[in-house]
Image (spheres, coloured by chain):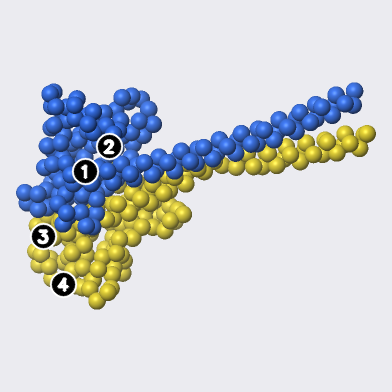
Amino acid sequence: MEMIGLVFIVVIIIIGMVLYLSLSGKDDSGARANRAANAQKSSSFLTAIAETDIVGCGVPLSRVAQACVRREVFCDNGDPCITLERAMTKIANETLYAQGMKYNLSLEGTRVQAESDCDSANLSVSLIAAPRQPIPLGNGQTVDLILSICR
Amino acid sequence: MEPIIIVIVLAIIIGLVLLYYVRINAHEVKTDTANYQAKEDLAMLGRLTTLPELACPRSETVKTYCIDLLKAQAFASMMGDARSGPASKVYYNPVLGATNITLRWYDLAKPPGQMAQQLTIYSNLRDSTRVRTTTTYFTAFEPVNSTRQFAMLIVERQS
């Protein structure tokens, strides 16, 4: 009889430990939904910025990015990479930074980069890789616009 | 005495199991709610940008979500009109629901800090205390000059 009692006590202790371990974990259901929402927001940002017309050029930012990669003289005969970086910085500061987000927005394979105090060590880790917007260069090649949001 | 102790112990075990089951269910409900809200937000965006009263010309909708600025201004004016507004809200309620929808677009020609212009397209929130806000970026098309501007859609929904 005493053994049965001991067995019950052991069972209770084990169940209690299992419950404690499983219930003390962080509830990440909201965090996962947030990460997906942030990824969707980042993707929509890249799609929208690529289609925004650049003042004075009358063409979308994606066209300026093409000119930058191909090293063409463009628009106001200036450097298209500088035009591109200025436009990216202006838009990102007015939107992402104004909403309290630190960011790193860059054109892959170039020095074109717009960022706001974003240390690479603080780039947010998410279940989905940093969104990219491919910009066609012709001949089947593309260059990616990449956005990373910092913690 | 012993049977009483056994009953007490069994009751404790059953109580712990029930507690565990309730917590698991609550977690699943939270996850399902978060997923449903995320899907609803995407569905709302799709409905908004395909409404003929707001949508861009077909040639502009190929690459991105797009809203026609002139149409948006007309839509907002109709919603704000004292005569047509209330009936319009009843008409659009099945599509847009109990939401506030604000359009904000950015003119790159203006200096930083003065680029943004804002317009409330639709205002039908019933309780402003329990609100969930979603923002999405898209293109605002200005049909007179055929220019595309960077824009943001802010949707406040009843939560």
On the same chain: label 3 and label 4?
yes
Chain for disc number 2: B
Instruction: Please say whether residue B151 is visible from this viewpoint.
Output: no
Q: Which residue is mark 4?
A: A72
1 vs 3, front mark: 1
Earlier sequence position, callout 1 versus callout 2? 1
Colour seen for chain A: yellow
Q: Classify the position of the N terminus of chain B by image quarter.
A: top right
> Percent from the top left, x then y, of residue A76?
9, 64
- Gap between marks 1 and 3, in whole Å? 31 Å
Q: Residue at x 21, y 49 (%)?
A: B66
Mark 3 crowd level (few <14, some 14–19, many ≥20, 10 Å Cα): some
Residue A132, position as x, y percentages in the image = 33, 60
Categorize mark 1 by other alpha carbons within 10 Å: few (<14), some (14-19), many (20+). few
Q: Chain of mark 3?
A: A
Q: Which residue is mark 2?
A: B95
Numbered label attached to residue B51:
1
Name the residue furthest right. Answer: A1
Q: Are marks 2 and 3 in contact (CB under 8 Å)?
A: no
Which residue type does callout 3 highlight? Answer: Cys
Identify the secondary structure beneath mark 2.
helix
C-alpha span from label 2 to label 4: 47 Å
The tint of chain B in the picture is blue
Which mark, by number, is residue A57? 3
The residue under the point 39% across, 46% down is: A37
